Amino acid sequence: MRRIVTDAGAARRADAVAVGALLAAVPVVHRIGPALDAPYWLDESWVALAAKAPLVDLPWVTASTPLGWTLLVWSVPGGGQLQRLIPLLFLAGSVLAGYAFGRFLGWPGRGWAVAAGLSAGAATLLIPAQVVRHDLKQYTAEGAVALLLPAMTAWLESAWSRRRLVLVGAGVVAGMLFSHPAALIGAAVLGALLLTSAVGGRRGRLRDTALVSAGTAVAALLVYVVLDRPNRNVALADYWSGFFPTVGGLPSYLGNRLAELTPALGAPWQLVAAAAAVGVVAVARLGRPATALALLLVPVIAVAAALAGVYPLLDQRTSHFLLVVAAAVAGTGLVRTAADLTGHLPAQTRARTRTRSAVAAVLVVTAMSAYAMANSRVLLHPPAPGDPGEDVRAQVAYVASHRRPDDVIAVNMSGQFGFAYYWSEDPPLLRRGGPMATGWHVSYADGSRILVASGRDTAAVADLVATAERLAGAGGRIWLVRSHVNADERAAWHAALAGGVVDEIAVGPEPLATLTVLQTPGHRTGR
């Protein structure tokens, strides 16, 4: 009994040291300072604006973001960029999930198990796709959930019990609150458990798995129908349409998309796919057949979902979970490969066994170091969060300090969310509908003298300018706050402001401007 307790204590200490090392490496690779400094850009600002929404409005304000994730954003005080800690925390969670995945496989000894956990966790940490995912979106949460569910499956296979099986099912449902592809991963996991139980002739396990799978499916469908499906709108479907391949065009689609993902993978996709395949084989050889089968089913289900128009395929953001899983599985396969390569060394004595283990460790560290060096540019100089060409925060700060009571503020359609988030003098009114893929838009009370464009085309911009001029009156001043302006909208603004008295103010990458209303309404002189 004393030896068992001692071994258990040693295992806990080894895990604690390994986990501590991985967590300590997270802020080294993924710097916190820049994430808290850079302003939110369009895709982040509407997520951040949820912090100002009433709690009862979160189910529709969450839009394409999972409700649980939006609730976390809502719980963090707004005004700055503190919410970016949420994706960073989930990123750290994905590294821990990677460690758990490698650790729970059937390794012949604790040392190999810890080494596999470290390798899977390090691969999850170092893949370039993770380095650029510091924006205020749920993609790192999707990566964490996508790794946690296979890790839980391996944990279940290590010591099967009904309690663990129920926890796996509960993990699928809970994961859907933070990750849309959790449903895809969950289908792969439960399908693999059903198949392996049926093939193995284990009627008791098959019965229990079928019952848990049925309950999980009902709960997952409820989450989808109540929380997810209502927020899918035409604009969002149009945005995703390019990531729904046809059956006939699937081969070329996969080749093109995977080639585009090479920088995010940090290596040629063929090499990553081969390494992940080795990892899947290793998982099966280590006594986790259901886990291995689930990993094989994940890409199959992802492709099927895209062909059915349900979930986009190989978009770098929405398919981030696939890249993270591939990295962790490849990291696990690396350890198994090193173990196989060194297995031919003589190991009749304890010293020789240690030598073989040391050689395997050197092989793993060398391979992981080579991967890090190959991606040193992005690891050492990660891009700043957000879009460097957008900074509505600077425009808002300038207007807030220079605005006169009678001034009017005109905000373009894509700048409305960032303006509403950073502007503190007038509370925004969040309204359902509008042309944005979010399914909602921003407006202000009449007395605020703040106007928001209804669109980005020539008619919408011209209507905004004309309305602002009538509100400002002769001699009045209009602040023009514009962000994320594309070429067509730029032309629309040029036409709407032609002949007006416009002064540009350089406050950042997106220049702020004022429009002075002339004494003679409807008459404009040259600029």
Image (cartoon, helix red, strand yellow):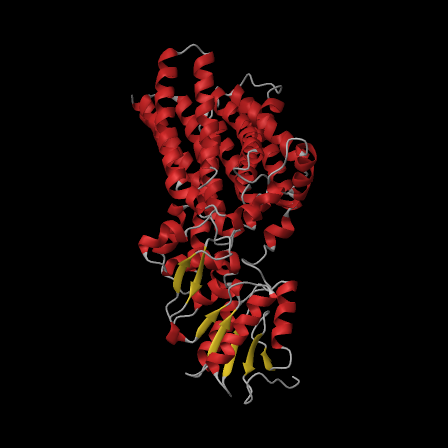
Image quadrant for the N terminus? top left
Coordinates of residue 9 in the picture (x, y in percent): 35, 31
Query: Residue sitting at 50 percent across and 26 percent down?
Result: 294
Query: Residue sitting at 48 percent across and 75 percent down?
Result: 409
Q: Residue furthest toward the left?
A: 1
Image quadrant for the C terminus? bottom right
Residue 288 visible? no
Between 186 and 1, the one nearer to me in the picture:
186
Coordinates of residue 391 in the picture (x, y in percent): 54, 67
Q: Residue 302 occupies which quadrant of the picture?
A: top right
Between 332 and 227, the one nearer to me in the picture:
227
Residue 499 visible? yes
Q: Residue furthest toward the bottom?
A: 519
Position of residue 456 in the picture relative to residue 95 (left or right): right
Coordinates of residue 157 in the picture (x, y in percent): 42, 22
Q: Residue 403 occupies which quadrant of the picture?
A: bottom left
Position of residue 156 in the picture relative to residue 242 (left or right): left
Coordinates of residue 153 in the picture (x, y in percent): 43, 27
Query: Residue sitting at 38 percent across and 58 percent down?
Result: 51
From this view, report whether residue 168 is shown above or below residue 377: above
From this view, report whether residue 57 is shown above or below residue 188: below
Position of residue 302 in the picture relative to residue 499 (left or right): left
Total marks placed: 0
Q: Residue furthest toward the top?
A: 201
From this view, report whether residue 346 is shown above or below residue 526: above
Between 335 and 129, the one nearer to me in the picture:
129
Query: Residue sitting at 50 percent across and 27 percent down?
Result: 112
Between 417 and 75, the one nearer to me in the picture:
417
Position of residue 522 in the picture relative to residue 196 (left or right): right
From this view, report whether residue 256 is shown above or below residue 104: below
